[in-house]
């Protein structure tokens, strides 16, 4: 079975540009979450979507947005990129129950902002 | 602030020894805890989880202990192998949060010496 897949794997952008990151959850999983992991730190929660609705948002500026599609895949958009947005962006999916469940992570998209 | 943290940033052990990785949490409302392993260039990989109504849970070569009195979580790895070398994160999920929003600690780098 395929795990969580993310694309692209690496991305280089310049300040002020925007970026779109994509994620496909594990088949049958309806919840997708996004996390940002800065080098040397643990992942930080950005968004969670369940059944195409936003269920939670972390402490990130409005430049960050996301959406979930009918097939449960998801996109994370970041506008007006800053140098500090350079990080590994992780997508995770969780089983169908809307409750505390373990997250299954993809390998992430490494974003470098120059 | 409320956070999950680790006592030691690095841990070095000999192959075959047992490893113990510690984690302290501050939110008494947390009811679900997870340990993840992250290898370089990869996303976090689920190891084991435990709910707050349990004190101990065992998996294959791993054991998680939860002490709610002192808000302490530990991961024990038996007969540590070179393939266990990675960064280990503990994470908590709070009871009042809908869905799955994990708060991660900073991580412990485990190095296994042959």
Image (cartoon, coloured by chain):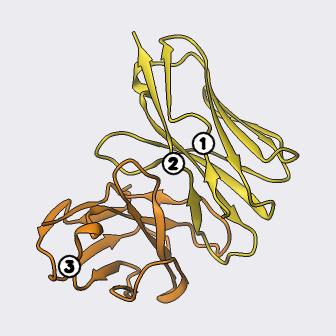
Above/below status of B99 relative to A112: below
Q: Disc 1 is attached to a residue of which chain?
A: B
Name, please, the residue furthest toward the front. Answer: B1
Whether label 2 touches label 1, CB < 8 Å:
yes
Q: Colour of chain A?
A: orange
Q: Residues within 10 Å of mark 1 (few under 14, many from 20)?
A: many
What label sits on residue B98 in the rendered view? none
Tell me the residue that label 1 is attached to: B6
Q: Residues within 10 Å of mark 3 (few under 14, many from 20)?
A: some
Helix, strand or loop for disc 1: loop
Helix, strand or loop for disc 2: loop
Q: Nearer the viewer, mark 3 or mark 1?
A: 1
Q: Residue at x 71, y 57 (%)?
A: B32
Residue B42 in the image: state x and y as whole percent.
33, 47
Residue B82 in the image: state x and y as whole percent.
40, 20
Helix, strand or loop for disc 3: strand
Q: CA distance from mark 2 to mark 1?
A: 7 Å
Chain that the image shows in yellow:
B
Above/below status of B73 relative to A46: above
Q: Disc 2 is attached to a residue of which chain?
A: B
Q: Quadrant of the C terminus of chain A?
A: bottom left
Tell me the residue that label 3 is attached to: A19
Q: Are marks 3 and 1 on the same chain?
A: no
Above/below status of B37 relative to B12: below
Tell me the residue that label 2 is attached to: B106
């Amino acid at each position: 079975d395929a795990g969580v897949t993310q694309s692209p794997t690496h991305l280089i952008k310049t300040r002020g540009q925007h970026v779109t990151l994509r994620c496909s959850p594990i088949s049958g999983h309806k919840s997708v979450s996004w996390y940002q992991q800065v080098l040397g730190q643990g992942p930080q929660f950005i968004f969670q979507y369940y059944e195409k609705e936003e269920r939670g948002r972390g402490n990130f500026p409005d430049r960050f947005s996301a959406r979930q599609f009918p097939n449960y895949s998801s996109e994370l958009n970041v506008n007006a990129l800053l140098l500090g947005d350079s990080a590994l962006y992780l997508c995770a999916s969780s089983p169908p129950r809307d409750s505390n469940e373990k997250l299954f992570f993809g390998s992430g998209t490494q974003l470098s902002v120059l | 602030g409320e956070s999950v943290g680790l006592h030691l940033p690095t841990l070095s052990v000999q192959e075959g020894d047992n490893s113990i990785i510690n984690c302290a949490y501050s939110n008494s409302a947390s009811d679900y805890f997870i340990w993840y392993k992250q290898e370089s260039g990869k996303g976090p990989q689920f190891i084991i989880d435990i709910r707050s109504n349990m004190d101990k849970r065992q998996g294959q070569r791993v054991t998680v202990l939860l002490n709610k009195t002192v808000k302490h979580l530990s991961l024990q790895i038996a007969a540590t192998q070179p393939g266990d070398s990675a960064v280990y994160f503990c994470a908590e999920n709070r009871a009042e949060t809908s869905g799955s929003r994990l708060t991660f600690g900073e991580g412990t780098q485990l190095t296994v010496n042959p």
